[in-house]
Image (spheres, coloured by chain):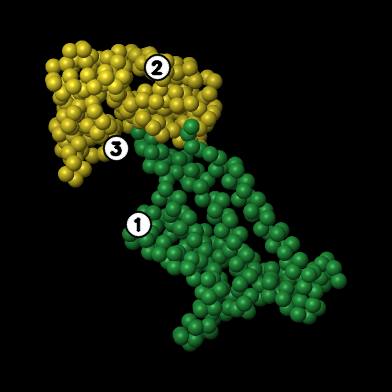
């Protein structure tokens, strides 16, 4: 049985797994970019009230293996509060939290490190606040943050695989199930690898292109 | 006239400016000289209202608390050109707000500062001298009445400094009041209509460029002899 045969025979199961993975990604990416972006902006504006605590949480999360964090929220926490939450939502929440604080760290760092002299130049040449934000700050900050943000989102997509370990029916778990039935690990995991390559390579390529196109060396000689 | 009256500025206990009175006249070049750390750049930053004084006032054409830009603009030693824009875009961006004839004026400035060959480059593709001229052009395109220049010739060779001197004379003829901080005594001698010598947060001596040839205060005499020795 070839990779193609497996894909054609089991495509309904793969599509179901794929849709769960994509839903997870939509939640993780959407919340990470929107809430993480907002948290990063707030962290820059209110460093003591928001910036340091947010960096502290991010530092803490960086020290806890994701799998431990996921299992901890799935079993002990739910047992402590005597609740049962759909694993999909547990996984989405856990991964979204990680993404939100990671995105916030990238945005806050870029804003904190923004060279003030460009703002002084904008001031003394009479640029409006709107022009300063949209023509100076935003383009320079986007150049700085776009490649790491895209690479982080690719990493988050890879990490969704962990949710299979708490029984989320995402694409990796579907692949495992099919393998359990027909035992064709080489073909099945190759098909899975091809799927991830098809999704991740264009995003990685975009990140590299943005990096080479926009983050050229801006330093003066 | 751009005037400062009884200007005081300190950071904590560190007194930087201690009662400065100064007038920058339109169509004149005023040069500020003095040892490093004596408050020249702070004075410039206060005049273009990037910082607030602890005491004293700044009058722009007799007006108190007037918005400085675009009437007053500044060019700093480090130039601060926006690195993601071409040199032409660096000049045109501020122009759109303040100069309805920017498209025409930029061509005049390109000619005046001889920027034809590199105007479409990015700042990091240009030499210091080229960036210097662009920074000046960016300041001038908004039609300021007063231009404050902070050691803009510090990184230039003799030839480029002479070129800038010529350009400043052109600006003076156009009625622009120029305040120029410099460490080059000979440049101040040639360019200035008025020279002020700052030391310890105060104007110790001021007058025509002749004071550089015949200083009356001991402090300026010492400074000039040291400057002569260093050059």
Task: Return the residue at label 1.
Answer: A46
The relative height of residue B193 versus residue A213 in the rendered view (above or below) is above
Q: Secondary structure at mark 1?
A: loop
- Contact between marks 3 and 1 (CB within 8 A): the answer is no
The relative height of residue A61 versus residue B176 in the rendered view (above or below) is below
Disc 3 crowd rating (10 Å Cα; few below 14, some 14-19, many 20+) is: some
Mark closest to the chain's N terminus, 2 or 3: 3
Task: Return the residue at label 3.
Answer: B50
Question: Residue B58 location, x and y as percent?
Answer: 21, 31
Comparing A55 with B7, the one in front is A55
Is residue A194 left or right of A148 when viewed as pictured?
right
Q: Which chain is yellow?
A: B
In the rendered structure, find residue B158 and report the number of the disc placed on it. Answer: 2
- Contact between marks 2 and 3 (CB within 8 A): the answer is no
Question: Residue B79 location, x and y as percent?
Answer: 40, 31
Distance from disc 3 to disc 1, alpha carbons, whole Å, reads 22 Å
* Chain for numbered disc 1: A
Comparing B181 with B1, the one in front is B181
Quadrant in which the C terminus of chain B is drawn: top left
Distance from disc 2 to disc 3, alpha carbons, whole Å, reads 31 Å
Quadrant in which the N terminus of chain B is drawn: top left
Is residue B76 left or right of B198 when viewed as pictured?
right
Tell me if residue B222 can be seen. Answer: yes
Q: Closer to the camera: disc 1 or disc 2?
A: 2
């Amino acid at each position: 049985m070839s990779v193609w045969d497996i894909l054609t025979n089991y495509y309904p199961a793969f599509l179901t797994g794929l849709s769960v993975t994509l839903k997870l990604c939509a939640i993780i990416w959407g919340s990470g970019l929107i809430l993480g972006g907002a948290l990063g902006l707030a962290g820059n504006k209110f460093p003591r009230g928001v910036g340091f605590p947010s960096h502290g949480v991010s530092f803490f999360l960086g020290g806890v293996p994701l799998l431990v964090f996921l299992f901890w929220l799935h079993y002990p926490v739910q047992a402590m509060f005597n609740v049962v939450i759909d694993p999909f939502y547990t996984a989405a929440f856990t991964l979204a939290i990680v993404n939100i604080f990671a995105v916030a760290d990238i945005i806050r760092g870029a804003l904190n490190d923004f060279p003030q002299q460009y703002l002084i130049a904008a001031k003394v040449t009479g640029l409006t606040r709107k022009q300063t934000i949209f023509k100076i700050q935003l383009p320079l900050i986007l150049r700085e943050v776009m490649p790491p943000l895209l690479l982080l989102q690719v990493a988050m997509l890879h990490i969704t695989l962990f949710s299979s370990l708490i029984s989320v029916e995402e694409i990796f778990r579907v692949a495992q199930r099919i393998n359990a039935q027909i035992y064709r690990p080489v073909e099945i995991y190759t098909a899975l690898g091809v799927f991830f390559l098809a999704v991740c390579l264009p995003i990685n390529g975009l990140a590299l292109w943005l990096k080479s196109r926009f983050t050229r060396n801006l330093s003066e000689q | 006239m751009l005037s400062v009256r009884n200007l005081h500025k300190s950071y904590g206990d560190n007194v930087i400016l201690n009662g400065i009175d100064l007038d920058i006249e339109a169509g004149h070049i005023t040069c500020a000289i003095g040892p490093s750390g004596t408050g020249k750049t702070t004075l410039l930053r206060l005049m273009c209202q990037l910082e607030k004084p602890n005491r004293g006032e700044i009058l722009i054409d007799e007006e108190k608390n007037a918005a400085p830009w675009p009437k007053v603009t500044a060019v700093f030693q480090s130039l601060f050109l926006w690195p993601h824009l071409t040199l032409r875009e660096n000049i045109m961006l501020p122009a759109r707000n303040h100069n309805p004839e920017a498209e025409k004026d930029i061509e005049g400035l390109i000619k005046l500062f001889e920027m034809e060959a590199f105007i479409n480059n990015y700042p990091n593709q240009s030499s210091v001298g080229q960036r210097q001229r662009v920074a000046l052009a960016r300041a001038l395109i908004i039609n300021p009445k007063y231009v404050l220049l902070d050691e803009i010739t510090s990184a230039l060779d003799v030839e480029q400094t002479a070129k800038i001197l010529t350009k400043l004379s052109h600006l003076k003829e156009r009625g622009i009041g120029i305040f120029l901080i410099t460490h080059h005594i000979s440049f101040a001698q040639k360019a200035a209509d008025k020279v002020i010598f700052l030391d310890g947060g105060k104007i110790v001596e001021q007058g025509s460029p002749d004071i550089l040839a015949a200083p009356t205060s001991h402090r300026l005499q010492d400074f000039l002899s040291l400057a002569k020795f260093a050059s």
